[in-house]
Amino acid sequence: MKKISVIGVGYVGLVTAACFSDLGNHVTALDVNEERVAGLKRGEMPIYEPGLEELVNRNVQAGRLHFTTSYPEALKESEFIFICVGTPSGGDGEADLKYVESAARSIAEHMQAPAVVVNKSTVPVGTGDFVADIIRKAQPKPVDFWVVSCPEFLREGAAITDFMNPHRTVLGSLHREAADKVAQLHLPLRAPIVITDLRTAEMIKYASNAFLATKISFINEIADVCESLGADVKEVAAGMGFDTRIGKQFLEAGLGYGGSCFPKDVKALAYMAEEMGHEPRILNSVMEVNGRRRELAVRRLEQALGGLQGRRIGLLGLAFKANTDDMREAPSIDIAEALLAAGAQVRAFDPVAMPAAAELLPKVEMAQDAYDLAEGCDAILVVTEWNEFKNLDMGRVRESMKTPVIVDGRNLYQPQVMRNMGFDYYGIGRGYNENGIIETEIEVRPHAA
Ligand code: UDX
Ligand code: UDX
């Protein structure tokens, strides 16, 4: 059992604190946001993450997990101090490190005993040295510390699963013994542990996220070509994915990526490259292709309806992806704003993200459920791939709509089935040609036993 402090209880920090306490460690988690800490003490979660509420409250009850706004309390007897504060994009794409700097300074001022300072926030290559400098200069009296980079690979909506079952743990440090100590913390996860230097660990994080974002923009580009050539991108992706060099995941064409990670991490990596005199051609294309996905959805609606002025459009889903309430860089924001600017009336339904979205999209009416959303709509755009949208009573949806136009931004539905039900169905890359939609049923025969 180790004593761990976690600084910043957002999407990353709260999951990190809860999971380490569930592994039997004693964790004190700090946040500067007093309402957030007060809420957590009452058992209220500041974010939606499946399984988090039960995990947090069980470990608080067991006395392994505590929340505070006081650094002296948070750092008392800590052997490990995890920095999990936000690293938002600055204006030109560079990661803004003001929160990391503030946390490092507070750690320096209040740490009472030697500790390993672990950077979990996604930080630009070289930040590990930056954090060490800040701590060294801000300490009122020298206290031994070692900085280790331990980037997070958590997907929102699956963060607990991803923490407890990582593909790998990456550790970077200039001090091997410090990295070994952090490796010990992760042994119960029984996953490969990559130990390298600080800068390499920081780059592994950026390169991993940038590659995943590249896969998404790649399949989105292929989708556009499929549409013109009459192929079905869902089945192209399925056929590609059997090649283990390509892999099945992150080949879902749609409205592109959003969230608090891919957009900022690809931008930050491109910025770092340019700062070093390199032209990040691929990364710039990844961002450019991704940015156009929102316009594509609006254009598809405009084509289907013959114009947007005065039309009533329903957005099915608002969060940047399913199983989260996170609206950061959600495609729904750009799409809703473009539709409103074109004179359309916009309604929306999301099982979880409507409270967060209401502040960002005050002119969007929020519906009670998917059927209420469909009421009187000229068209529905599927924005987020929530499971509950996959088995709606589409007959009831069609009856509620003024005109049965569906633009399926996440390819949840089967084109032929929807057309047979009387919908004017538009998917993303689903094999359009002049005769409408080609439906091919891909058949996968498992190899003979
Ligand atoms: C963020 C990024 O999204 C992620 O890519 C990066 O790896 C880690 O930082 P996230 O948990 O999403 O992760 O950030 P956020 O949800 O904004 O939470 C950060 C928390 O830190 C907030 O609760 C904020 O109040 C707190 N904070 C911020 C501090 O406790 N101290 C500070 O000085 C600044
Ligand atoms: C991502 C990385 O997966 C995770 O490892 C890292 O730590 C943080 O960033 P996250 O942003 O939470 O996690 O969600 P993810 O599931 O990766 O989806 C990111 C975005 O890509 C979402 O907007 C999603 O809709 C989109 N996406 C994902 C696609 O458009 N197509 C896909 O095939 C997969």
Image: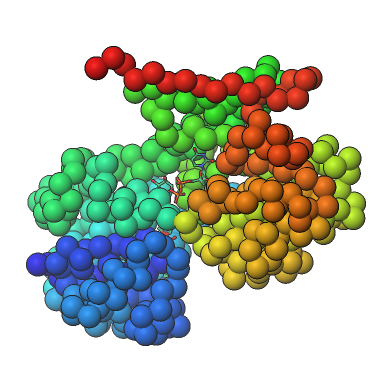
Identified at 23% across, 56% down, the residue is 147
Identified at 36% across, 43% down, the residue is 205
Q: Position of residue 85 (x, y in %)?
A: 39, 64
Do we see residue 282 in this rendering?
Answer: yes
Residue 125, image quadrant: top left
User: Which one is nearer the viewer's eye here, 430 or 332?
Assistant: 430
Residue 60, image quadrant: bottom left
Q: Position of residue 160 (x, y in %)?
A: 32, 57
User: Which one is nearer the viewer's eye here, 160 or 8?
Assistant: 160
Q: Is residue 125 above or below residue 63?
A: above
* Quarter of the figure that contains the C terminus: top left
Left or right: where 285 falls relative to 132: right
Identified at 68% across, 17% down, the residue is 229
Q: Position of residue 163 (x, y in %)?
A: 28, 54
Total number of numbered discs in the rendering? 0
User: Which one is nearer the viewer's eye here, 241 or 449?
Assistant: 449
Left or right: where 422 falls relative to 93: right
Left or right: where 233 falls relative to 295: left
Q: Is residue 162 above or below residue 277?
A: below
Do we see residue 361 in this rendering?
Answer: no
> According to the image, what is the colour scheme of the structure?
rainbow
Report ligand 1 position as a quadrant. bottom left
